[in-house]
Each structure stands twice: as structure tokens, then as C-alpha cells.
Amino acid sequence: MLRNCGKFQTPIRLLSTVQKIDYKLNPNDIPGDATIFSMVQPTGTFHLGNYLGATRVWEDLCALKQPQQKLLFGVADLHALTIPKPNVEEFRRFRNEAIASILASGIDPSQASVMYQSSIPQHSQLHWLLSTLASMGYLNRMTQWKSKSNIKQSTQDDAAVGNVKLGLFSYPVLQAADVLIYRATHVPVGDDQSQHLELTRHLAEQFNKLYKTDYFPLPKTLLAPTRKILSLSSPERKMSKSDPDKASLIYVNDDPHAIKKKIKRAVTDSITDRFNYDPINRPGVSNLLNIVSGIQRKPMEEVERDVAMMNNFNDLKNYVTDVIVEELRGPRELFARFMKEPDYLDTVVTRGTEEAQQLADQNYREIANIVGL
Ligand code: AMP
């Protein structure tokens, strides 16, 4: 969109950098020549937050893929190592399960390239080039390295900061390289990744400015309507694979009994005569309603209308349980099936890696040429 500015009529390009996806993805939402890229870390079984925030959107994008669009979905195994993984066997299993989980979420490997980040060395090569443009001050303002090292956001504690590993501090730069190596235009992620995508756009701009080029597009954040799914036991935090309290998350392969038990124990509040979406005052109830709205692809007002007749938590929680159990039935069954088909998983990853590698290789040659390497 072009805007005239003041008496000089200077055109300013207004870039909408965050695009919130509607409950039902519309084919016209994404340009026909878009390159769409996203990843998930192999740090444990996928949960409802990964599913609603990321992989189900990926599934929708596969279903609506247009011939010229490129879809690339990866397992961010290098990122996972920013929290050391001395249990190598477990890490291997998580990497493998992550591929099975992506496919179990409905991602169609004939439409999307599915691969491991570590198999494409150009991610790391571009990471180095971008790290020469990323300032310590900008990285210092990022929140995730602090929360992952249990450091307060406004810390002045030099000793605590001094212990933080370089990889954890700088991994948003690798994340920028992950996206930019494919010259991705759209990145479907949950709300927790918004800050990292701002850095990605910033680094793309820095690169373009320095080398007087428009090589890198500024990728848009494609934000799922549910934005952030919260922990069931502490709804002030996001649902997270690394949460030691396993009752706080619903895994995509949880059986109905486990889902029922966890929802029954979910923290709510004491207002039982109505259930409304009020994330500030009623975070627990709002989280449950947000989950239902995400699964049913319904705006919140409709979900509120559906639960308006309920006047006790038993009814609400039974309803939420049924909605989740029904939604996760397919992914759970598929996950179990794919875990018994290692050859199939290998075939998918081999093909996905070849496709991604070809694009990354071609782009990196062009980038190296721009930089003078
Ligand atoms: P991660 O497991 O951190 O690699 O995240 C993989 C994807 O899931 C990213 O797009 C995240 O934004 C998304 N995600 C992770 N946790 C949540 C959550 N609690 N709510 C919504 N999206 C999430």
C-alpha cells in the first residue's frame, strides 16, 4: 500500500508485517507465489500449543497450496541443542518423533518439503553472515534466552548473564537464517515467535541496505487465531514442552483418558454461573475457550454462545474434553502408525531434504556472490 506523506508527497510503503490468520484460512490470504517456511523443535512430544499455533496451520496451507507456492517445514534440531541434550538416544528419538508428529498433524509431504534443519548446511552458513550484522544490544533485548536460562528480564546480574552460552544467546540469528535462506515470504508460527521474526525482518533490511540490494523479502508473520495456548496448571504461562509439570500440557498423542484427567485438573476460577472469554481476569477459563475456538475454527463470540447454558465446571470441562478428544483422535492414530513405519518417514525426509537443499544451495550461491565470497 502506498501512502502520500505531507506536502512532499513522499510515498511510504506500509508493510503489514504480521498477518493474523482467520479461523478458516482463505486461499486468497496467501499470494500464489509465496514461499512459506516454519519449524518446530524436537524437544519432546508435540502439544496442543504446537498443534493449534503451528502444525494445523501448516496442514491448512498444504490443503490450499497453489502450484507456484513453496512450502517447507522442518525439525529445528540445531535449535534444540541450545539446551544441551546429553541423552543422545532420547534426542534421536525426539527428532524422529517430530517428523512423525508433523505428518500426523496432516501435513501432506507431496505438497511440502519436510526435513531436518541440520541436514541443510546453508542454514548455518547464512547464520554466520547474519551474525556479523546482528547487534549484541538487539539480541540482549530478546526474551527467550533469558527465560530459558531462568534469568529475570531486567537482570543486571553479570555472573548469571556470563554463564549463558553463546548458542542460546544468538539462536534467533540462526532462526533468521533458517527463514531467509529460502527467501521465505510467510512464516506461520505462534505468538511466542513474533519477536524473533521482527529480528529476521531487521536483519533482512540490514543486509539489503548494506549491499544495496532487495535480495531478501521481509517475511510476514502468519499468526494463528489462537495466538498462544496456555499451561493448564499455570495459565499465566504458555503451554510448553519443557514444562516439568506434565499435567500442564496436552500432548497430541494423549489418549482420551489422559485428556479427561488433565482438563479436569485444569486451573479455572470460582465463577460458575457463566463462562466468558476474559484473559486478564479469567485466564484459565479463557484458555479453555480459546482451545475450543481454535479447534472448532469459530470466533470466540460463537463459542461463548455455545457454552452460555452451562452453569458448572463439570459441564464445561466435559465439553472441552470431548472437543479435544475428537480433534486429536486422527493425529494420535496417525502418529502411532507412522512410528511403526520408519522407512516411510525416511523416504519423506530424504525427498524433503533434497528439495530444500536445492533451493538453499542456489540461494546461498547468490548470497555469497552479493557478499563477495
Ligand atoms: P517450539 O516447540 O518452541 O519449537 O515451537 C514450535 C511452534 O509451535 C512455533 O511456531 C511456536 O510458536 C508454536 N508454539 C509453541 N508453544 C505454543 C503455545 N503454547 N501456543 C501457541 N503456539 C505455540
Image: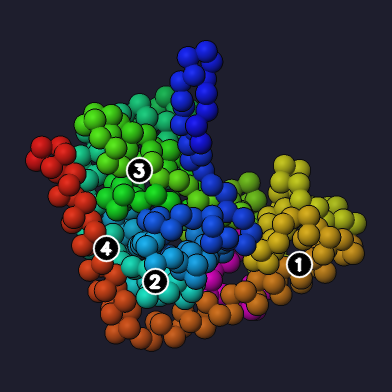
Q: Is residue 133 left or right of residue 80?
A: left
Q: Name the residue under label 3.
A: 217
Q: Which of 41 and 364 is in front in this view?
A: 364
Q: Which of 327 and 261 is in front in this view?
A: 327
Instruction: State whether residue 141 is above or below residue 79.
Output: above
- Give the CA separation, mark 2 to mark 4: 13 Å
On-image quarter of the C terminus: top left
Q: Quadrant of residue 150?
A: top left
For the point 81% across and 53% down, which residue is it? 276
Provide the secondary structure element on which disc 3 rests.
loop
Sequence-wise, which precedes: disc 2 or disc 3?
Answer: 2
Provide the secondary structure element on which disc 4 rests.
helix
- Give the CA separation, mark 1 to mark 3: 45 Å
Sequence-wise, which precedes: disc 2 or disc 4?
Answer: 2
Q: Which mark is on residue 196?
A: none
| First to last magenta residue range | 244-260
Q: Name the residue under label 4.
A: 356
